[in-house]
Amino acid sequence: MNKYKYIGKKEIRIDGREKVSGAAIYGDDIDFGANLLYAEIVSSTQAHAIIKKIDTKAAEQVEGVYKVFTGKDFPYKFGLYMKDRYIFAQDKVRFVGEQVAAVIGRTPQAAKKGAQLVKVDYEPLPAVTNQMDALKKDSVLLHPELGEYPHVPWFFPKAGTNIAHWRKTRKGDLEKGFREADLVFEDEYHVPRYAHCAIETHVAIGKYDLSGRLTVWSSSQSPHTQRHLFAEALAPMGLTHKNIRVIAPHVGGGFGGKAGVTMEILPAALATKLPGYAVKLRWTREQEFVNTYQRLGVVAKLKVGVKKDGTITALDHKIYWDAGAYVEYGANVVNAVGLSAIGPYRIPNVSIDSVCVYTNLPPGGAYRGFGYSEMLFGLESHMTRIAKKLGMDEVKFRLKNAIKEGDSTAYGAEMNPSGLIECIEKVAKEIDWGKSIKSKDPRKAIGKGFAIFWKAPAMPPNASSSAFLKFNEDGSINLIISGMDIGQGYQTVMAQIAAEVLSVPPSKIRVETPDTDRNPYEWQTVASHITWGSGNAVKRAALDAREQILSLVERVFTISKDQLYLEDEAVKCTTRQNFHLPLKDFVVNGIMTEDGTFKGGPINARGMFLPEFSSANSDPETSQGGHPNVHYTVGAGALTLEIDKETGKMHVLKAVEAIDAGQAINPDLINGQITGGLLQGLATVLYEDMRYDEKGKLLNPNFTDYKIPTAMDVPDEIVPIIVEVPQPDGPFGARGIGEHTMLPAAPMIANAVEDALGIRIKSMPITAEKVALALINNSKKRKK
Amino acid sequence: MAKIKFTLNDEIRTVEVEPNEILLDVLRDKLGMKSPKCGCDRGDCGACAVLLNGKSVRSCLVFAIEVEGQEVRTLEGISQPKLTQLQEAFIEFNSFQCGYCAPGVIISATELLEKNPHPNLEEIKEALSGNLCRCTGYTPIFDAILDVTKRRKK
Amino acid sequence: MAVVHEFQYHKPTSLKETLQLLAKQGEKSRLLAGGTDLAVYIKEGLEYPESVIDIKRVPELSKFEVTKDHVYIGANVTFSDILENQKIKNNWQLLWESARSVASVGIRNRATLVGNICSAIPSMDSAPALLCYEAKVHLRNAKGTRQVAIDKWWTAPRKTVRKADEIVLGVSLGKPSDKHAGCYIKLGRYGGEDLAQAGLGLLVTAKHEYRIAWCAVGPIPIRAKKTEKLLDGKALTPALISKAMDLVLSEITPITDIRSSREYRNHICRIMLQRGLEVCNDRLKSKKVDTSRILGG
């Protein structure tokens, strides 16, 4: 049925050969020769303290140490959505691991040696390491000047507290909704912090040349936004966007951790004090754990009212976020969930409080799912429990309440077209919902878990994408765009879109990683929005190219444009069978006419996309009235879980996930996101486990004790299902799915554990140990 | 400083190293081989894997001076003169996403297929269990290797 | 990662040369075989030897002999060497399963069994097998040789009776002469490589002799003598196994650490003993049992 040549096809990744041969260049692979200096960072050992003195004398004496810098060299703030963050700590440190000083060495050894000799005197302050304590009236304040911080207009900080932002969503009449309910169920859910663990750690090299131009090579998801933040932070030093250039090499995984700016500000700033040299900073794995963004922690209080027939009448969702010492990015996670914490359900009476709380822990920030994984753990656990209490099948319960096109979202906008019902039905069928399985092994129990999910891109209303497109003499195309392929296959998908419009195969389309001086603006590669946003820009650029091509041929050959089309890299004509003009003959050189003159010339095309309907304006007390989310992507998942009743160890026998991609541009890459995302999600619920001590120190900043999935941890069977209900304003109907695939994992496991063993675990991770000890406690209680 | 000589990708190389220089760093910074990557610096992730005398080792845990007189092979030495059947399969199956783990995985998979030309899925998982991949969920990597073994059987 | 600590590197090519170096440098030196522990310690500043003595080129230390009744594992023998040996796979099952559980291929290709028992981290996977096979550690210094029974080898976490000028030449293992079966069961947090949160080695003979050894649940690995005494001479029945399980907590002293709690370890060790004994019983009857998922997950 497929009406396209390249859309909807499994195309081979256009960056595949580069990555498999070892040709792909990542940040640390770039050579700078003898011009390169090495930075080593001195980090805080205190969670909250005044810096009394930094003694750098011994460090400066080390042979090979060039210079030493501290916060007083860079008294500047920065931040993506709120300016609460420092290049180097100033008078205070606010988390263990915060950067306090930098030693610049001519060799890595010298820098490291020097860093070991920097002495910092701290005067400890009371530290608060969980959000509920930070909310108490007598808690120490992390940011006494909170009221003065510049921030985006849709944030509402509460000066004089540790509340950096409070998103309130109120719809309908909550009390009335609960009165109408036949059953009201309340409970609390806890989700800890998590780490991205991209295999490549953060790395950036800054060079401030003798002409006053700053170049930063950065393993980043967001080169243009990085340039902007550098320009803001370094403006006091006279730098503006014109003189700042960010070049992104291949990125070895991002997952949100390489969005915005974290450690990259350090080599960028340091470079300005080291003119003529390049200076590299590469995080060790330990630094990667403690001083980059982390996924925020959550304490969620849910209260839901339902009628006997399963209709949800009211939802009161209070979510308290452990957002860390600086929330310039994390506060938007809180905001995004505050607008969407009803889940993909139709609920008339809603109250959501999403509270962003400062704590003396590393900064929370963007992590795949942007808060929705944390929210859905509680919500989807809760919905399953409610269905059970009603004596209703939980899939039927979800079908009954599933949000449909045109229904009202939490903030009063209309839900976009979505295949949620189809996703639920297909998943239920594939997992054989309703049939319980008994294990042949008497020591094992098997349970099934179900969850639905949704997410919208969380972006400012002017998040835009652009594309330039040019041809080469061999008919190949350079697609010049600034999204980042962080593994999801972005370059290939963009190539497929251009390929479809211009009838040039993706293998003849080159997409490189961007240079902000050469590639036009892209906001960030986050939010699962670039298939949609950048895809639209690329499609427009390709259409622009096609328009130029057909107009030229019309002009030169006097054939009406509406009789011309592109096929197999040539211009053809519906009315003249023999008309066949290969693109490579003229897309650079122009068309030679009979009198020897040339018409046309190089085809240079452009496209841009900005969602002009999006607005963050809304009532600050209710969130009603805005259009902050461009659209939601929806899906459903289920799994069959085998649990050893004595050890608590769990094994996923089969996992099914359906997602509505609108139009799958490359189904193989979507399957890749489903497989990879599901495994990452399962890891957060089954064994990833960040442990902090009471002094705010991370106890397991390595892969020995923070376990991420190996080849031995893959479920026996994963069935991906792609549903396609087109997104009207998406390129060929597509919308993004990259983050969503991990969203249902945690509640599916919690629900399957309850199904198999009758115990409900309301905190993550749900480890074998937790399950075994819960079973033991249960049987002890029963014996009494 | 000691001057050591060893075979790197079939070529005899000479390099000066201090005893405390790590093989991974020397390969990358002094000998022009950028394919082995640093992921964790403790031997936990496999991104630094290279073949030492045909066996995969964590080059982040080897001091360069130890490999004097030995044979080291990195991905650069596998990709030439042309990509192997295994590598072509990885491309065809879209086995990698960000690609950072790919050099280490290809080293481990190459070692596996040398030892055992027809591994089953369990053996493939075991051989790759020391290579962490955060992106793919491993399945398309297995699929590519299984396809190669199937084709070899014919 | 740049290594700040500087040291001298020696690569002796004979045992004599090695011993001379040790005699001179003793405490200030470290022996380097696979380096999978030492390299990490030096990189992270946990060890700072003045010299490192690479023993990989010393032929006497690479001896690896396997017969039906006797195994000798020289200092340079890696876990991969052990794993790839068919005789060990067929006749020394407990040792083979222990080797298989160590980390992953890339580590096993370098890590040595002797290095494992010298690093002496309480969770060392080789310990239960060596205890059950009643291994002997062969040491040598410039003055001569000596043997230490493996159950006298460890004194505390990370500490052995090796003197600073001694080198471990290798470890020799003996088997019970009767028909027997063995297995190694390891508690990890998931399917991938992990340091043992508890490790159990078992050898059970057809004549009802039992050898039971634990690692990771006490400061040093131990033989569970009380449990062995209870079972000695008796055929395994569910009732007897249940009694043995009740003795487990009196012999192990696990702690709560970042990997696991004492409570969970106590609970799992009972299960491990039960399932381990069942596996050995089945294997004695020549049943093929795969222990890789014996604890589930």
Image: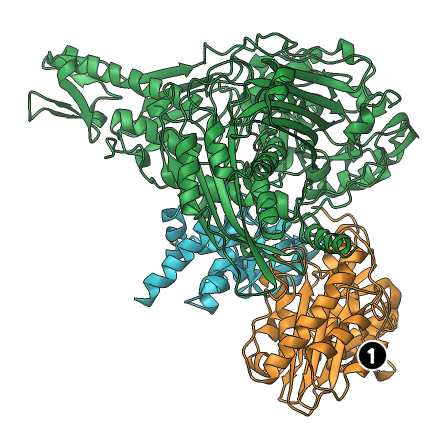
Q: Position of residue A371 (x, y in %)?
A: 61, 29
Q: Residue at x 46, y 61 (%)?
A: B121
Q: Position of residue A614 (x, y in %)?
A: 49, 12
Quadrant in the rendering for residue C283: bottom right
Q: Would you place residue A145 above or below residue C101 in this image?
A: above
Quadrant in the rendering for residue A536: top left
Q: Residue at x 71, y 46 (%)?
A: C2
Q: Position of residue A374 (x, y in %)?
A: 63, 33
Name the residue type under label 1.
Lys
The colour of chain A is: green
Chain letter for mark 1: C
Mark 1 residue element: helix
Q: Nearer the viewer, residue A493 or B18?
A: A493
The 10 Å Cα crowd at callout 1, few under 14, some 14 to 19, many 20 or more, is some
Image quadrant in which the C terminus of chain A is located? bottom right
The colour of chain B is: cyan
Left or right placement of residue A145 versus residue B43 in this view: right
Image quadrant in which the N terminus of chain A is located? top left
Disc 1 designates what residue? C225
Left or right placement of residue A776 versus residue A636 in this view: right
Q: Which chain is orange?
A: C
**Is residue A208 in view from this perspective?**
no
Q: Would you place residue B67 above or below residue B137 in this image?
A: below
**Is residue A426 in view from this perspective?**
yes
